[in-house]
Amino acid sequence: MTRALRRLASLRLTIWVLAALAVLFLAGLWIPQKALFDREGYLRWVAANPSLSRVLDATGLTDVYASPIAIALWVIFFANLLAVMSARFPVILRRVALSGPIPDPSSGGFPFVRRLPAQGPGGLDAARVVLERRGYRVRRDGERLRAVRNRFSPLATPAFHLSFVVILAGGVATSLTRFQGRVDLGVGERFTGSLAQFVSRPHVARFATLPAERFDVEAVAPTVVDEVPVRLEVALRDVDGTARSMEVNRPHCSDAGTCYVLEDADVAPLLLVLDAEGRELEGGYVRLKLILGKPAQARLMGLPLEVRLFPDWQRVGEEDATRSREMRNPALQLAIVTEDGRTVRKTLRAGEELAAGAYRIRFAGWRYWIQLFVRSERGLGVLLSGFGLAATSLALRLLFFSRELVVALLPADAVEIAGRADYYRALFSDEFEAVVREVATALAAIPRVA
Amino acid sequence: MAPTEAVFYWAALALYALASAGLVYAFVFRNERFIPRMLVLTFAASWRTPALRALSVGTVPLVVLLMGFGVTRNPTLGPLAASLRSGWLVVHVFFAWLAFGAYGLATAGGIAHELKRRGVRRAERNPAWDRLPALERLDELIFRWILFGFIADTVMIASGAIWARDLWGSYWSWDPVEVWSLVVWLSYGLAIHLRLTRGWKGAPFARVAIAAITGMFVTFFGVSFMVEASSHVFNVR
């Protein structure tokens, strides 16, 4: 049992676990990950590599960060951490205690030792004054002084390791309480909180809080400067009439803890399908990814349609072009395959129509639509506190390192000073020499006893 | 020549800042050019310590490489995208510079340590090695730089997580740059552990300091070349 615990607490195990995690993360860069690729792209890769994807899927390597291997490695890592700390904590407690016998300066264990002449018994008091002035906590026991600076610094070691557990607790809490999903809303549409409104099935963890807010999207106002979208403001109105707003980098968060993050905005053209007599057969706002100028695919009356947007349309020779990415003079280039297999193409401005066999397609108008990332989770504060604890503990332990000096009054009218420090022997040597100089000056100033 | 170049550089950066959204944002636009300057400034600040002056020898190759990379980038001035307009950008990027700068200095210290250690063993002793700090002191400096970098790295990751939560909805999304930042953080954490619990000092620790910088290069340069699906875009325009 003791041997098993010793192995669990070994640094060798830490190194192996961290190396294995690094290899796993490296694999995640090459192997397509379900969570990082769009569904269609992932399915295309699966179709192209059926046997390989089956093997990788079965071993969890297409979702490496949540794979059984990764979880097992994290479990070993934290078990290793706890085992190390349980073994070291009592030792650290003994170290920070100022009580206990003061060691002999010349007993070894002190890399720096100096002997100074002293006049009578006042030498220790003079040394004490110097050490206290330099920020040392001093205790006297008989003819010896023990002085420690940054005495509690060693406690930062378990605090640092505790921070990993706090980070883990925060991570577990956020994942157990997480609700997240995406919803697309056009201007004028209402978010009802219904799960059916989400683009795909949202992630609802065991203890998740479902969104309870109801609001309408009132307006979307993008600002583009030199073709760069520098601002995107969205005005919302709660069902009780309260006005809200959100921007990129400024989500709308409710009192219940659900946040609505603005992920994207684009243009939804209003396309109507009319028959020869002008009766409306089908139509509506079609939410498409158009604003970046790439063609998007849609279907109307079962016919495949390719749509391309020119936000600030102009004709350059025979070609359609756009002056900017701002919706100043929008035009749609439509290409539709008719029932007889012909492709009909035309560029339409608002109100214009395209004749496609038995139908007419009218570009009747447009509005913005937004994509919201809806999330709620608890425990992020705990997670960030863990990082804060880690950084603070490291600074306390290793930048404000503890130093220890022992001063002993020797029988032959002399004092002996010995010193040691954690981690920084060379840097401490400067401080030790300075202390010795100051103590020597203080000793020399003691009046000689007649 | 170096001070003249520095005057022109900082003046250009100030003009750039005036013409764009602000000083910090101007720095972000010139990430790859600013980091080497920060390394140079660090040494300028410690110029009164003669032992540290000689260490600049170790950073010069890194500075030249980064500046060479910087001049290949597009210098066009443009407005800052909405996604980058966040106070967290300032915190995140500032601590990234501190972390990467400190790791860079640790690497330089490691190189200097290795060169001096080999140099002093030769029969014909080169007096130039005396201008570098003593090996023991150099070793402690490397450790302190790694430590400072690690603390700054921790703040960088945490502030990035807070920013990501507002921008992407999730504080951690296993983006390749996030993953490699974690790998770098764990690597330097391991280096600190090796020092504290295994007593790695001198040559082995200097080699660790040199090797560990690889992860930083993969994060900052490698991922951009290897992966297209990263949400982190270092070449901001």
Image: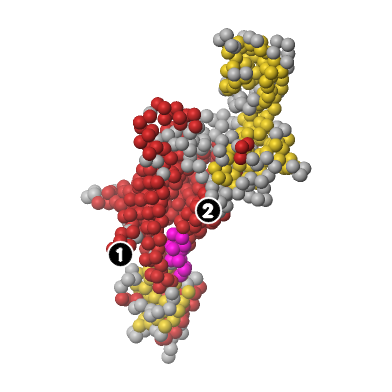
Residue A334: x and y in percent read: 62, 16
Residue at the spot 68% in from the left edge and 22% down from the top edge: A283
Is residue B229 a member of the stretch shown in magenta? no
Q: Residues within 10 Å of mark 2 (few under 14, many from 20)?
A: some
| Amino acid type at image mark 2 | Ala
Q: Quarter-wise, where is residue A24 in the image?
A: top left
Q: Pointer 2 indicates a residue of which chain? A: A
Residue corresponding to mark 2: A173
Q: Pointer 1 indicates a residue of which chain? A: A
Residue at the spot 30% in from the left edge and 73% down from the top edge: A108
Residue A3 seen in this snapshot: yes
| Amino acid type at image mark 1 | Met
Q: How crowded is mark 1: few (under 14 residues within 10 Å), some or many (20 or more)?
A: few
Residue B212: x and y in percent read: 38, 46
Q: On screen, B45 above or below A147? A: above
**Viewer-nearest residue: A105 or A126:** A105
Answer with left or right where residue B178 lies relative to residue A364. left
Residue corresponding to mark 1: A1
Q: Earlier in the sequence, mark 2 or mark 1?
A: 1
For label 1, the SS is: loop
- Highlighted range, magenta: A150-162
